[in-house]
Image: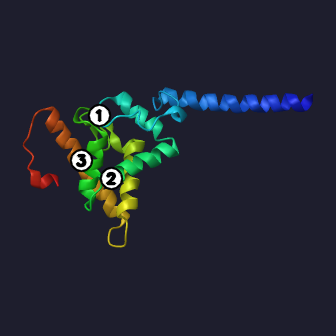
C-alpha cells in the first residue's frame, strides 16, 4: 500500500512539474499550442504576424521540426554567406513583420537575435560554410551584417523608401 501511494505521488509530482513548465512558457508568450502537435507544413512563410513567429519559436523546440526547418534553409543557401543569410531571413520574415525588429532590440523594437529562429539560421549557416578558410566568427559577422541590411531594407519597403543602392545590399 505504501509503495502504490509513493508511486502515485511520484507520478503526480512529474505531471505537476510538466504543467508548471508549460505554464511558465505560456506566460512568457513562447508557446501558444503544443509543440508535439505542430505540423511541419502548418507554418507558412514568410511570417506576417508576431503570433506566427511565436508559433515558429514553439515549433523549433521540437527537434524533428528544427531538422526539417534547417533542411528548408539549406535549399536557400548559395556560396556567399551574406546573401545566404539574407535569403533565409527574407524567407522567414515578411517586410511588415521585420519592420518591428532590429538586430539587438531597442526600447520600441524587439531584437531578432534573441529568437530561436535566428540562432537556428546562424547554426545552419555555420554548419554549411564553416571551414579553415571561413571561421565561425566570420560567418556570424556576415549574418549580423546581412540581418541589419535586411531589416533596413524591410523598413524601406514598408515606408516606401527606395534609396539604398543595390551594390551595398549584396
Instruction: Find disc 1 in the rendering and name its residue.
Output: 109
Q: Nearer the viewer, mark 1 or mark 3?
A: 3
Q: In the rendered structure, find residue 148 and report the number of the disc placed on it.
A: 3
Quarter the N terminus occupies: top right
Query: Residue 154 in the image: x percent, y percent?
Result: 20, 39
Q: Secondary structure at mark 2?
A: helix
Q: Residue at x 57, y 30 (%)?
A: 22
Q: Badge 1: how crowded within 10 Å, few (<14), some, or many (20+)?
A: few
Which of the marked residues, 2 or 1, is nearer the chain's N terminus? 2
* Real-space Cα separation, disc 2 to disc 1, in angstroms: 30 Å
* Real-space Cα separation, disc 1 to disc 3, in angstroms: 13 Å
Q: Residue at x 26, y 43 (%)?
A: 90
Colouring used for the render: rainbow
Query: Residue 70 in the image: x percent, y percent?
Result: 40, 50
Query: Residue 133 in the image: x percent, y percent?
Result: 32, 72
Which of the marked residues, 1 or 3, is nearer the chain's N terminus? 1
Cβ–Cβ under 8 Å for marks 2 and 1: no
Q: Residue at x 33, y 57 (%)?
A: 140
Quarter the C terminus occupies: bottom left
Instruction: Find disc 2 in the rendering and name its residue.
Output: 75
Q: Is residue 121 shown left or right of residue 80? A: right
Q: Nearer the viewer, mark 2 or mark 1?
A: 2
Which of the marked residues, 3 or 2, is nearer the chain's N terminus? 2
Cβ–Cβ under 8 Å for marks 1 and 3: no
Q: Is residue 52 shown left or right of residue 165? A: right
Q: Secondary structure at mark 3?
A: helix
Q: Is residue 42 above or below residue 135?
A: above
Q: Is residue 22 shown left or right of residue 120? A: right
Q: Nearer the viewer, mark 3 or mark 2?
A: 2
Amino acid at each position: 500500500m505504501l509503495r502504490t501511494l509513493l508511486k502515485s505521488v511520484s507520478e503526480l509530482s512529474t505531471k505537476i512539474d510538466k504543467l508548471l513548465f508549460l505554464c511558465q512558457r505560456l506566460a512568457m508568450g513562447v508557446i501558444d499550442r503544443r509543440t508535439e502537435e505542430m505540423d511541419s507544413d502548418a507554418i507558412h512563410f514568410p511570417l506576417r504576424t508576431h503570433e506566427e513567429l511565436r508559433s515558429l519559436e514553439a515549433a523549433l523546440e521540437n527537434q524533428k521540426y528544427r531538422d526539417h526547418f534547417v533542411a528548408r534553409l539549406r535549399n536557400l543557401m548559395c556560396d556567399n554567406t551574406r546573401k545566404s543569410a539574407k535569403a533565409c531571413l527574407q524567407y522567414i520574415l515578411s517586410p511588415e513583420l521585420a519592420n518591428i525588429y532590429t538586430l539587438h532590440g531597442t526600447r520600441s523594437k524587439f531584437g531578432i537575435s534573441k529568437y530561436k529562429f535566428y540562432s537556428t539560421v546562424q547554426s545552419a549557416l555555420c554548419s554549411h560554410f564553416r571551414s579553415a578558410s571561413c571561421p565561425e566568427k566570420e560567418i556570424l559577422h556576415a549574418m549580423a551584417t546581412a540581418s541589419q541590411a535586411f531589416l533596413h531594407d524591410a523598413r524601406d519597403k514598408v515606408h516606401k523608401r527606395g534609396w539604398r543602392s543595390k551594390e551595398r545590399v549584396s
